[in-house]
Amino acid sequence: METPPSTSPAIDGKLPATGEKPEFVQGLGLYSATCIVVGSMIGSGVFIVSADIARSVDSPALLIAAWVITAIMTIIGALSYGELAAMMPRAGGQYVYLREALGPMWGFLYGWTLFLVIQTGTIAAVGVAFGKFLGVFFPSVSSSHWLLRIGHVPTLRLGSIAVGNMDIGLNTANLAAIVIIAIVTVINIFGVKTGALVQNIFTTTKAVSLLGLIVIAFSVGRDPAAISQNFGPGWSAFWHNASASVLHPVSTGAGGVVELVGLFAVLAIVQVGSLFSADAWNNVTFTAGEVRNASRNLPLSLALGTGLVLTLYILANFAYLSVLPLHGDPSGTSVLARGIQYASEDRVATAVLEKIFQSSGAYLMAAAILISTFGCVNGMTLAGARVYYAMSQDGLFFRSVGKLHPRYRTPVTSLVLQGFWTALLCISGSYGQLLDYIIFAALVFYILTIGSVFILRVRAPNATRPYRAFGYPILPALYIVMAVWICSALLRYKPQYTWPGLAIVLLGVPIYFIWSRVGGGRPSY
């Protein structure tokens, strides 16, 4: 394993002289940094994934427990990352932390996976979600309305893993996604302050919209029958379902084989949905070079942003349970009959508003999700490009990506390249599968990064630490234990989410050695 010296400028904070080279503008304050955290986290997941979780846990209390576990892990992760962010306030964030603690190859593997799937695939998925909900207002915008259908890739099976089964081409839904991606890319080219202004507006709007959904559900949408079912016998059933001896049916593998698993296993498995909905909180670390007083504002923004979002997520699920029964009939003809488990196309939040406002509820929810997804695309576009810039500075990505525009001080080539690859993922139809594959790998990188807190405490004990991880070493260790358990459960019960993701990461190993030679060995540290 390659290990850089402990006197790295990234750790001691002494940055190399840059001469006339354009530098990032520190245009992000605490509010803007917090908005990047909040805006990158809140996409469309919280409005949808509770249906799938509810089908797996079959208990109102366990539905809430799944989100509480996600909240605990995410907040511990953010508090741990705060120490690294305060130590190394450099553009690239998590890439820099892994590079400094474990060596340049590990930083590259993270950046490689981020570019190939994690960041660009998420932007593509959220962008297409924007297109689908735009179709509520404009029916011609649809994933089935093809403008150019190139072909179909059939399902290919490798044991329990299935790949393929996707249509390739341009339809009106992914065209809308590509247009939105192009718009936010251009916005972010014209300076970090412009991108931050858009992010602040949309993040504030969507946080208020989610809060409005919660308030409306609790105030005028409460349904006595749903409350009785969910918080009466349904809630008390938690004590039965919580027993480790009670088994839950879980569909495993690509063939849909059903296995019976215990409580802790099922709660680990359903984290795929809830952790994905809460993911991307680390994006603000990518923009560290543009945050004013980064050693203070980065840890604060991580704590404030994740705390706010996870509180809203848990309250939103209580709100769902106060309006709709958890259990439902998949063939039901009304939102009450279908319940949370079988909400139409898993759109639980839409079902809640339809219950309260009838047909106009779908339009209200669609408008809220359009705002949410646009803000999410903008935040992730702004942040992701900074990682590829940092990789280029180290000679591990295209040289042009490591240059800033002389006037706007933004990584223009990095933004354009990211947008281009994201657009290709939209057209390929593969981003959905890629996201499924990479959730496990993303969790592995979180484990490695939080492990870096321990490594750097030993390797660089005298480094300046304006903020020290809250609860160290107990809370960071707890995160690692919980994350390792989830990874183990996914390896066992959801191989279709794990092995392909590992394959994508490992493919980066030979690429690293090739690129490190071609790049000429120009590390900036």
Image: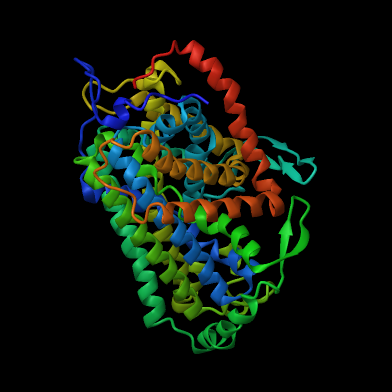
Q: Looking at the picture, how far across and down is residue 323, in whole percent? A: 49, 79
Dividing the picture into quadrants, the one containing residue 247 is bottom right
The residue shown at (66%, 72%) is 244
The residue shown at (31%, 64%) is 208
The one of 382 and 286 positioned closer to us in this rendering: 286
Way the structure is coloured: rainbow
Q: Looking at the picture, how far across and down is residue 233, in whole percent? A: 59, 88
Dividing the picture into quadrants, the one containing residue 507 is top right
The one of 18 and 215 positioned closer to us in this rendering: 18
Q: Is residue 169 left or right of residue 209?
A: right
Number of callouts in the render?
0
The one of 154 and 307 positioned closer to us in this rendering: 307
Q: Is residue 42 visible?
A: no
Residue 133 higher or lower than 496, as above or below: below
Q: Is residue 207 left or right of residue 236?
A: left
The one of 238 and 388 positioned closer to us in this rendering: 238
Residue 395 higher or lower than 339, as above or below: above
Residue 134 higher or lower than 162, as above or below: below
The residue shown at (49%, 24%) is 2
Q: Looking at the picture, how far across and down is residue 135, in whole percent? A: 50, 54
The C terminus: image quadrant: top left
Q: Is residue 269 left or right of residue 405?
A: right
Q: Looking at the picture, how far across and down is residue 223, in whole percent? A: 48, 85
Q: Is residue 267 visible?
A: yes
